[in-house]
Image (cartoon, grey):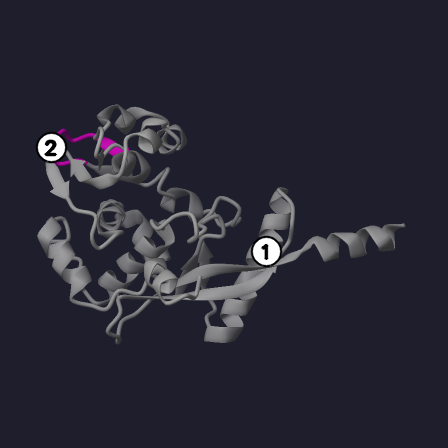
Amino acid sequence: MEQRSNSMAKSQDAVEHRPVFMPRVNSDNLVKTDMVRFERHVGFATRQKKKSINDMHQVIRKKYGFNHVLELSSKSGNKLSFPLSPFSLKITDEHDGNQYSVENAFQSSMVFEDGGPYIDLLTAPPRQARKDERLMTSGELIGYNYFGMEWGTEPLTVFYDWLYVNALKQNPQLHEEVMQYQAFTDITFNPKKSIHSAAYALALFVALNKREMLDNVEDPMTFYDLCTEFKISNTEHLLEEGWI
C-alpha cells in the first residue's frame, strides 16, 4: 500500500519552468535571464516546496556550474531571504524620512486611467496592499507617481527595479552576504502572471555593485540611462521570444 502511495505521489509531480536571474559583469547584459526546467513536487506543504527548489537549484548548478544560488521566496529556508523580500526590505523616502517596504511603495504609486495613486497603501500591510481591489478595477495602468516623482511604464520593470535597488543600497548590512551569490530564483514568481520580480531586481543590484555603478542610482534619469544602455534580458523578453 505504501509503495502504491509513493508511486501515485510521484505520478502527480509535474515538469515546471521558472526563471533564473544571473548578474553579469563582462557582458552587454546587466542581468541574464534564462528559463529552468525542473520537477515540481505537487502539494502546498513547505517540504514539497523545498524539494522543488532543491531540484531547480540542482539543474542550475549543473547547467551553469554555480555553487551559490539564492531562492528569494519564504520557502527557501535561507535566513537571508526574509530581509530581502519586497515585503520586508524598506526604502527610506527622502521627502518625509519614513520607511516603507518596497511592496508598499510600489503598489501605492500606481496610476491608472480611472484612479490612483492610492497613497493609503503606503501604510497597509504589504500583502494586503498587493491585493487591494482598486488595483484591479481602476482601468489600465498608465504610469507611477512616487511622492510626486513620475515614471512611465517603459521599460516595463524599471520603476520597480529602481525602488528595490535603492532600498537594498540603503541597507548595507545585507551587501556582503548578497554579493556571494551567483544567481537568484523565486519559485513563487510566475512570469505568465506577473512581470515584476524582486529576484531580477536583486540580480540587477549585484551586477551594478560589481561594476561599481551604484553611484547616483537614486536619480531616476541616471538609473534609467544605466538600465537602458545595456541589453535587457528579463521575463518580458523571454515572453516575446516565445520561451514562456
Q: Give the residue displayed 73% in from the left and 57% down from the top.
A: 11
Q: Can you give x and y, in whole percent of width and height, for residue 143 in the image?
A: 19, 41
Left or right: 73 in relation to 9: left
Q: How far apart are the alpha carbons under marks 1 and 2? A: 43 Å
- Which residue is nearer to you in this view: 183 or 179? 183
* Residue 213 shows in the view: no
Tag count in the figure? Answer: 2
The residue positioned farthest toward the right in the image shown: 1
Q: Is residue 36 magenta?
A: no
> Residue 52 — which label?
1
Q: Which residues are magenta?
A: 93-100
Callout 2 amino acid: His
Left or right: 48 in relation to 145: right
Left or right: 235 in relation to 7: left
Element at label 1: helix
Q: Are marks 1 and 2 in contact (CB under 8 Å)?
A: no
- Which residue is nearer to you in this view: 228 or 185? 228
Q: Give the residue displayed 39% in from the left and 28% down from the top.
A: 128
Q: Give the residue displayed 30% in from the left and 48% down from the top.
A: 173
Comparing marks 1 and 2, which lies closer to the viewer?
A: 1
Q: Is residue 99 magenta?
A: yes
- Displayed quadrant of residue 55: bottom right
On the image, numbered disc 2 is attached to which residue? 95
Q: In the rendered image of this protein, does residue 102 appear above or below residue 176?
A: above
Q: Can you give x and y, in whole percent of width and height, for residue 142 in the image?
A: 20, 41
Which quadrant is the C terminus positioned in?
A: bottom left
Q: Give the residue displayed 22% in from the left and 55% down from the top.
A: 155
Callout 1 amino acid: Ser
